[in-house]
Amino acid sequence: MNGKKLIPPHTEKNFIINISGQVITLLVILFTIPEIIKQIGVERFGILTIIFVVLEYLGIASIGITRGMIKSISEKLGHKVAEKIGQEIAEITWTSLFIVLCTSVLLGVILASVSSFLTKIFNIPPSIYAESQKAFFISSLVLITNSLIVVLSGVIESHQRFDIVNFLGVPNTVLNFIVIAIVSHFSKNIDHLITFIAIKNFVMLCIYFISAVKFIPKTKIRINTKNAKEILTQSGWITSVFILSVILSRIDRIVLGITMSPEFIGYYTPPSEIILRLQFVPVSIYITLFPVFSYIGLENKEKLKEIFVKYSVYLATLSMLISYILFCAGYEVLYFWLGKDFADEGKNILKILSLFFFLNSQTYIYLTLLQSLGKADNIVKLYIVETPFLTLFVWIMAREFGSEGVAISLVVRGIFENLILFFISSKVTGYKISFKAEKTKMKKLIPFVFALLFCSLAQIVEGKLDYKIKMLEVFAGFITLVIFLFIFVLEDNEKKRIIKEVRKLMGKNKVKQGR
């Protein structure tokens, strides 16, 4: 490997920073959503969810352009030509900001003009129709500020300052929920809540600009058409992947919003939000492995296969533990979080979605591999073929079986995507399943079989056991699962490393107790 390190500098540090930021965000959301629902009610919360989904859809263009900008700036920084680098980076940055500003303003105008139409198609009750229409109109301002914040964050990210990215990004995200939770005590109107989000965004935009401008070389502000073409070209496939992936990840709520009342979305959203927010686990691994796969490339397929298989097992292990807890203790999670009504309505949805979380998490390892090797077009082609069929399937399942049917359709999607992406990734890496060669590794499946059996047992005894006994059962199963994973999945050197770290930690505690 030419004597270079396999993992680029700061990758592990950036992974810890990113995952810590995501954990903080998740905790704030868990604490604020119950208060928001309590204050504004399930119907208004459902409309609020739809507005945020629409904003996420329309914000995809700015994300794709930002990724193109980051790639261009990173390439320029890699060449380190002192004489020209400053002016080129400045031109790329200002050009990207100009493109995003124009795009977001255009989309904002379109959103404002169709606010009445959006209010009609989402089965909104007459009692909150007027405020919902105003909320959609005001959200056009949120869209513009969101888009500019994304590209300014990208400027900082391109210089590998993930500490600043998270220092600003975490408050920016959690303040959405905190602001709504506070304002909801004074007004339940959705348009008032969105207005305060717009004000918050404007303040954060100013802070982002002050922080990002430090990374923009102080040269004459110029909009370069050549850079614009380069950025738009590079962002093409990336934007396509983002557009289709966001459509696929939100199609369940969109279909429910059109076919059912906002109350259905209100009960479906908390289990769905749990699964969505837990995606920080595979996303953090994605961020960590992307530079590793990019560095190795297709020149060293053996090393690529080794890391691909190794981290596939690790990701499956981590996501399985989370899925196990959600499946076996889904009712309790929702009960303590949102109360009995949400637990009764959402327990089966959360159980089904826990299976989807396990399946969907595994696809991230394939997506990381394909994107890092310049094979993103394969992902786009898959999503293009999949989207219309999935939309129709989700629609039928929603009509026939309601919210639980929608959740089941996502599990089917997870199975399908895993099979197709595994096939594509195997062709790229040259990996082939050989049962003779893999006999020694078959023991790694033992914990997964155990988890399946334990989840089946939990389903059978559902509602028949005392709460304390059930929690003891779930805890015992979790500990047993962790032990099985340690024995059967981890390699010998990894076991030794963990034991060494535990002993070191215990040694420090003994020293403290001695004092």
Image (tube, rainbow, N blue to C red):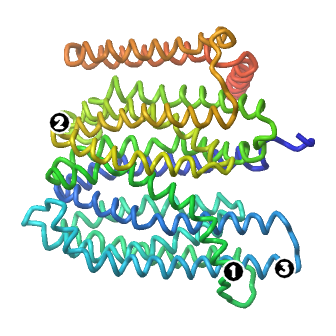
Secondary structure beneath dot 2 equals helix
Rate crowding at label 3 as few (under 14), some (14 to 19) or many (20 or more) other CA atoms within 10 Å: few
Q: Distance between the residues labelled 1 and 2?
A: 52 Å
Q: Earlier in the sequence, mark 3 or mark 1?
A: 3
Q: Nearer the viewer, residue 476 or 511?
A: 476
The image quarter containing residue 366 is top right
Q: Which amino acid does label 1 sit on?
A: Lys
Give the residue displayed 45% in from the left and 19% down from the top.
478
Q: In the image, which disc is placed on residue 413?
A: none
Q: Which amino acid does label 2 sit on?
A: Phe
Query: Where, quadrant-wise, is the C terminus in this rendering?
Result: top right
Which residue matches tag 2?
A: 401
Residue 514 seen: no
Q: Which of marks 1 and 2 is nearer the N terminus?
A: 1
Q: What residue type is labelled 3?
A: Lys
Query: Where, quadrant-wise, is the N terminus in this rendering?
Result: top right
Q: How far apart are marks 3 and 1 (CA)?
A: 16 Å
Give the residue displayed 88% in from the left and 73% down from the top.
81
Secondary structure beneath dot 3 equals helix
Point out residue 143 in the picture as x, y percentages from the top left corner: 40, 72
Which residue matches tag 3?
A: 84
The image quarter containing residue 88 is bottom right
Q: Which of marks 3 and 1 is in front?
A: 1
